[in-house]
Image (spheres, rainbow, N blue to C red):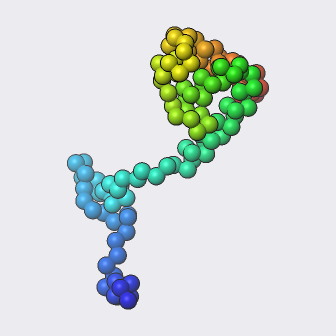
Amino acid sequence: MHFRSNKKNNNTVSLNDAIGFDKDGNEVSLMEVIKDDSIDIIDMLHTKENVMLLKKYFKILSPREKEILIKRYGLLNEEEQTQKEIAKTLHISRSYVSRIEKRALTKVLREFLKNNKGL
């Protein structure tokens, strides 16, 4: 019966209700000050689309290039790693990881540009 009693008293608050003013004298609503930690669905879909597109271009990479990109950027549910961490795991120098990463990204970019000339 709590809802009925609230309904009668009309003690409702809207997120759009003004709760005060900012330093410039503009009204500030409750919605503007509530922190929202939820993931933006548009950003999530855009990222998912980009990862799917990137997977399409993985076929042109060597296994090592693919592995480094996956680890470096945290793709395919991997945790993002630094070049130093990848170098330690693969027993190669950090500068070599950097060169492989750069080469792999260049290959992917070239393939993308080749397949999307009209964009």
Quarter of the image where one finds residue 49: top right
Quarter of the image where one finds residue 108: top right
Q: In the displayed structure, would residue 97 be above or below residue 29?
A: above
Measuring from the top left, give residue 114's x and y in whole percent: 76, 21
Q: Is residue 71 left or right of residue 1?
A: right
- Which residue appears at 56% of the width and 35% of the height? 78
Front residue of 103/10: it is 103
Viewer can see residue 103: yes
Q: Is residue 59 left or right of residue 85?
A: right
Measuring from the top left, give residue 116's x and y in whole percent: 74, 27
Q: Is residue 79 left or right of residue 9?
A: right
Which quadrant, please, contains the N terminus? bottom left
Measuring from the top left, give residue 76's x and y in whole percent: 62, 37
Viewer can see residue 109: no
- Which residue appears at 57% of the width and 45% of the height? 44
Front residue of 11/90: it is 90
Q: In the displayed structure, would residue 30 be above or below residue 89?
A: below
- Which residue appears at 72% of the width and 27% of the height? 57
- Which residue appears at 25% of the width and 56% of the height? 21
